[in-house]
C-alpha cells in the first residue's frame, strides 16, 4: 500500500501530537487490521479519466454522490474548511464504537444536537488532522497522543457550503480514555456502535429534503446507551458515519442513501463557496 502522504491533497503532519507506545504495545489485531486497510486510502476517482492519479488504495465500496464532485480539497480555503474526528475504539467484546458528543444547550447553533468532535480550521492548524485533534481536546479533553490518525475521507459539503473533512483515528487504549466535556460546548459524551449506521431497523428512518433545488434524503438514527440515555444522530454526522462504516466493513448500507448531487448544488450556489461563514462546522447541514 502506498502511504497516505503519497497523495498531495492529504498532507501528513502529525509530529505535533506524538503517539504513546508502539503499535505492538497498544493496538488490537482488529484495530491494526483497520489501520492497514485505510492507511493508504484515497478517494475513488471521480471518473475513469482520473484513475491514473496519485498512488493509494481505492475503496471498492465507491463514492457517494454527496462527495463525488468535491474530491479536490483545494476547492476549500482555510475559511471554508472544517474537520471532524471519527475516533474509533474496540470494546472488550470486539465491537467497534465511535465517540460522539451532544452539544451544549447554550450554544447559538445546533444546540443539543449530536455531533462528532470537530470544527472550523484555524490558520495555525498545519492540516485537517490537527484541526480535528485540537477540537477534540478542546471539546472533550481527548489527549491527541492517544489517537492514531489513519486516514482522511473525502470532504462532505455542509449546508453552509463548508468542506467538512472526516479524520479517522484509532484510540490506543480505553484505559487512557477519560472524556471531560467542556460545559461551554458539550453537554455529554457517548459511544455508539459503528455498524449500526449500515443496518436497516426501526431505529433508522429518513426524510426527503430539497437543497438549492436538489432532492436528497436526511438519515436519522435513534440510539440508547446501556445506561438508558437516548440520542438522535442525524444529518451530516449520520452521513459521515454511514460512509465510514461502509469503508471499514466493506459493504453498502442496507438502505438507499440518496445523497445530494453536489455538482448540482455547487452549480446552483454559483460562487457561494467563497462566501464568509460564521458556523463552527459541527452538524452544519442542519
Image (spheres, rainbow, N blue to C red):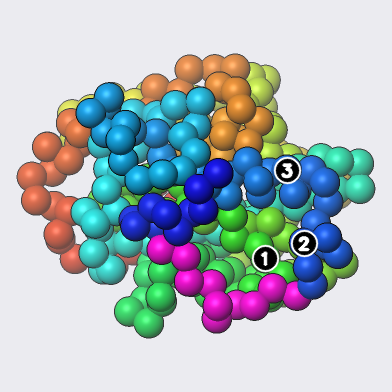
Q: Which residues are magenta?
A: 11-20
- Callouts 3 and 1 close, C-beta under 8 Å: no
Q: Position of residue 208 (x, y in %)?
A: 38, 24
Q: Which mark is residue 33?
A: 3
Q: Which mark is residue 133?
A: none
Q: Position of residue 88 (x, y in %)?
A: 69, 52
Asked if residue 33 lies in the magenta stretch, the reply is no
Work out how far the residue at label 3 is from the one at label 1, CA to CA, in angstroms: 16 Å
Work out how far the residue at label 2 is from the one at label 1, CA to CA, in angstroms: 11 Å
- Callouts 3 and 2 close, C-beta under 8 Å: no
Identify whether 78 is placed above or below 90: below
| Residue identifier under label 2 | 23
Q: Quadrant of residue 53?
A: top left
> Which comes sooner in the sequence, label 3 or label 2?
2
Q: Nearer the viewer, mark 3 or mark 1?
A: 3
> Which comes sooner in the sequence, label 3 or label 1?
3
Q: Secondary structure at mark 1?
A: strand
Residue at image location 67% in from the left, 65% down from the top: 147
From the viewer's perspective, is 268 left or right of 119?
A: left
From the viewer's perspective, is 80 left or right of 62?
A: left
Q: Report the front residue among 70 and 23.
A: 23
Q: Quadrant of residue 245?
A: top right
Disc 1 crowd rating (10 Å Cα; few below 14, some 14-19, many 20+) is many
Q: Which mark is residue 147?
A: 1
Residue at image location 60% in from the left, 23% down from the top: 251
Amino acid at each position: 500500500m502506498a502511504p497516505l502522504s503519497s497523495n498531495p491533497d492529504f498532507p501528513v503532519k502529525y509530529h505535533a501530537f506524538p503517539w504513546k507506545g508502539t503499535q505492538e504495545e497498544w493496538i488490537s489485531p482488529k484495530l491494526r487490521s483497520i489501520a492497514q486497510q485505510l492507511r493508504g486510502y484515497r478517494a475513488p476517482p471521480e471518473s475513469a479519466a482520473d484513475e491514473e492519479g496519485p498512488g493509494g488504495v481505492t475503496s471498492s465500496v465507491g463514492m457517494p454522490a454527496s462527495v463525488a464532485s468535491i474530491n479536490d480539497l483545494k476547492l476549500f480555503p482555510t475559511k471554508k474548511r472544517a474537520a471532524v474526528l471519527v475516533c474509533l475504539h474496540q470494546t472488550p467484546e470486539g465491537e467497534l464504537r465511535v465517540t460522539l458528543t451532544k452539544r451544549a444547550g447554550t450554544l447559538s447553533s445546533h444546540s443539543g444536537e449530536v455531533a462528532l468532535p470537530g470544527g472550523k480550521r484555524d490558520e495555525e492548524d498545519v492540516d485537517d488532522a490537527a484541526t480535528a485533534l485540537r477540537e477534540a481536546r478542546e471539546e472533550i479533553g481527548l489527549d491527541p497522543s492517544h489517537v492514531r490518525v489513519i486516514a482522511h475521507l473525502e470532504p462532505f459539503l455542509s449546508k453552509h457550503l463548508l468542506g467538512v473533512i472526516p479524520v479517522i483515528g484509532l484510540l490506543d487504549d480505553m484505559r487512557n480514555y477519560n472524556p471531560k466535556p467542556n460545559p461551554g460546548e458539550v453537554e455529554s459524551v457517548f459511544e455508539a456502535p459503528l455498524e449500526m449506521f449500515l443496518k436497516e431497523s426501526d431505529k433508522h428512518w429518513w426524510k426527503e429534503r430539497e437543497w438549492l433545488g436538489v432532492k436528497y434524503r436526511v438519515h436519522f438514527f435513534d440510539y440508547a446507551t446501556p445506561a438508558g440515555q437516548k440520542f438522535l444522530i442525524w444529518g451530516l454526522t449520520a452521513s459521515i458515519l454511514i460512509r465510514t462504516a461502509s469503508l471499514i466493513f466493506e459493504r453498502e448500507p442496507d438502505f438507499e442513501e440518496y445523497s445530494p448531487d453536489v455538482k448540482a448544488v455547487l452549480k446552483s450556489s454559483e460562487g457561494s463557496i467563497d462566501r464568509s461563514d460564521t458556523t463552527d462546522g459541527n452538524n452544519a447541514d442542519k
